[in-house]
Amino acid sequence: MEHDESLPSSAEIEALARRIDRPVVLVGMMGVGKSSIGRKLSALLHMPFTDADEAIEEAAQMSISEIFAQFGEPYFRDGERRVIARLIDGPGTRRVIATGGGAFVNSETRALILERTIPVWLDSDIDVLVERVGRKDTRPLLRDGDPREILTRLKAEREPAYSQAPIHVKSSSGPQLRTVGRVLKGIAEWL
């Protein structure tokens, strides 16, 4: 289901927050806005927010770029899966979690998210992604080539996995609260 709505009223958001009984997990490409949308969503729903990438870096005591460089992507994905499982099943399960772009592509991680959370696929056009990821040089998968080509390829490869999320929301270059409103409406309709 796709959504294009404005922000619900405070009363509607509070009623929705009372209906949420498990984590809301944001999945999608790097640069789509999972962390920034997740922070705004968590504030409106009065739930804690966790960026899975930050939790991974804290657990590993190194940056994601360092993990990729030293141990490789398969090692990182295994650690990512374990951290996400801990976040989903840990105390305070009513939370908003932003995952890394490749997390939902891992079949075990995807199964866990689909079974135990409210999964929301944030999606954007390539132009929006390229503009957003160009703001910082911390993305290991974009270091060895043209970001537009890499993002286009990754998006095509990952969309079959992302499309399994029951809630699909477009994140555009407009105001973030518009996207947050779409996410809230999508959750309300799905519950």
Image: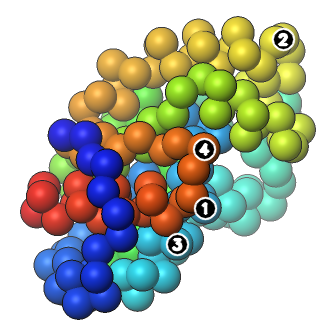
Q: Quadrant of the N terminus?
A: top left
Image point 76% across, 45% down: which residue?
A: 64
First in sequence, mark 1 or 4: give its number: 1
- Look at discs 3 and 4 and give the one toward the viewer: 4
**CA distance separating discs 3 and 2:** 32 Å
**CA distance separating discs 3 and 4:** 16 Å
Whether residue 190 is visible here, answered yes or no, is: yes
Image point 65% across, 32% down: which residue?
A: 129
Image point 60% across, 23% down: which residue?
A: 126
Residue wearing tag 3: 40
Q: Position of residue 87 (x, y in %)?
A: 44, 66
Amino acid tagged 2: Gly
Q: Are marks 3 and 1 in contact (CB under 8 Å)?
A: yes
Q: Position of residue 4 (x, y in %)?
A: 31, 49
Residue wearing tag 4: 173
**CA distance separating discs 1 and 4:** 13 Å
Image point 89% across, 38% down: which residue?
A: 137
Amino acid tagged 4: Ser
Residue wearing tag 2: 145
